Image (cartoon, rainbow, N blue to C red):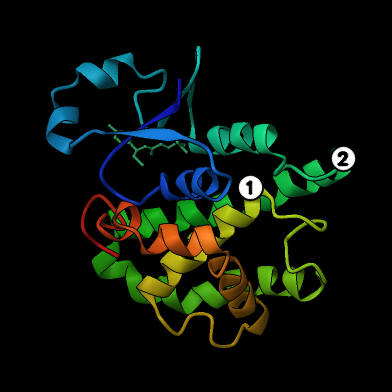
Amino acid sequence: APIELTYFPVRGRGNAMKLIMYDQGVEWTDKVVTIEEWMKGDLKKTCLFGQLPKLKDGDLVLYQSNAILRHLARKHGLYGKDGKEAALIDMMNDSIEDLRVKYLRMIYQEYETGKEKYIKELPGHLCYFEAILAKCPSGFLVGDKISFADYNLYDFLVVQKILCCKCLDNFPSLKGYVDKIGSRPKVKAFMESDSCTKLPVNGNGKQ
Ligand code: GSH
């Protein structure tokens, strides 16, 4: 049976895993849960931590977006060539998660009052990834191959550009990275497809 992804009709935490599945040629079905359906509460009660996304792969049922990314990575060779690379990829992904949490806090809790400050502070966070990528001849975060952290960072950076189109202007390596990953034929096709463009970036309509 194909993998089944249950999530809200937003890009949010779902897009990076969809990108991986699309780019890696994984078959999956989308189970879209509207907010109205969710508000009824029945599905929430069945979710291990009361939240989505949820990924069903055979008899494995997974919650937590980063655990889902890692599961897909293990299955599809997106977790480095050895334990050392895997550790470094985990480290990168944790840092992306830190930034994602900051972004989501601003979007959901203080968009009106905190957006300008967030945009002002963003270069101070992105500069670390700029320095990392400037030193990577492969153009990926770790090693010679794309990893789940690359899909996650790419997705995050695209969303930052939606917030502030100039945010990568002083970061040539990050710009080149977004262009490079974004020009992978299936990544490009997915990002231009209805599955991505028809969805709001976030659940509250802010972006
Ligand atoms: N750490 C979790 C993950 O990475 O999957 C966070 C999951 C999360 O925040 N889910 C939100 C949710 O289910 C949507 S992105 N909200 C509805 C609710 O909490 O009732």
142 relative position to 65: left or right: right
Rounded to the nearest whole Å, what is the CA distance between mark 1 and mark 2?
14 Å
Contact between marks 1 and 2 (CB within 8 A): the answer is no
Nearer to me, 192 or 93: 192
**Residue depicted at x 70% and y 55%:** 146
Quadrant of image for the N terminus: top left
Q: Which residue is mark 2?
A: 82
The number of discs equals 2
Mark found first going from the N terminus, 1 or 2: 2
Q: What amino acid is labelled 2 in the image? A: Asp
Q: Which residue is mark 1?
A: 148
**Residue depicted at x 87% and y 43%:** 84
Q: Position of residue 92 (x, y in %)?
A: 69, 53
Nearer to me, 101 or 48: 48
28 relative position to 84: left or right: left
Q: Position of residue 148 (x, y in %)?
A: 63, 47
Q: Quadrant of ligand 1?
A: top left
180 relative position to 56: left or right: right
Q: Is residue 39 above or below residue 126?
A: above
Q: Which disc, if any, is residue 21? A: none
Q: Is residue 155 above or below residue 182?
A: above
Q: What amino acid is labelled 1 in the image? A: Phe
- Helix, strand or loop under label 1: helix
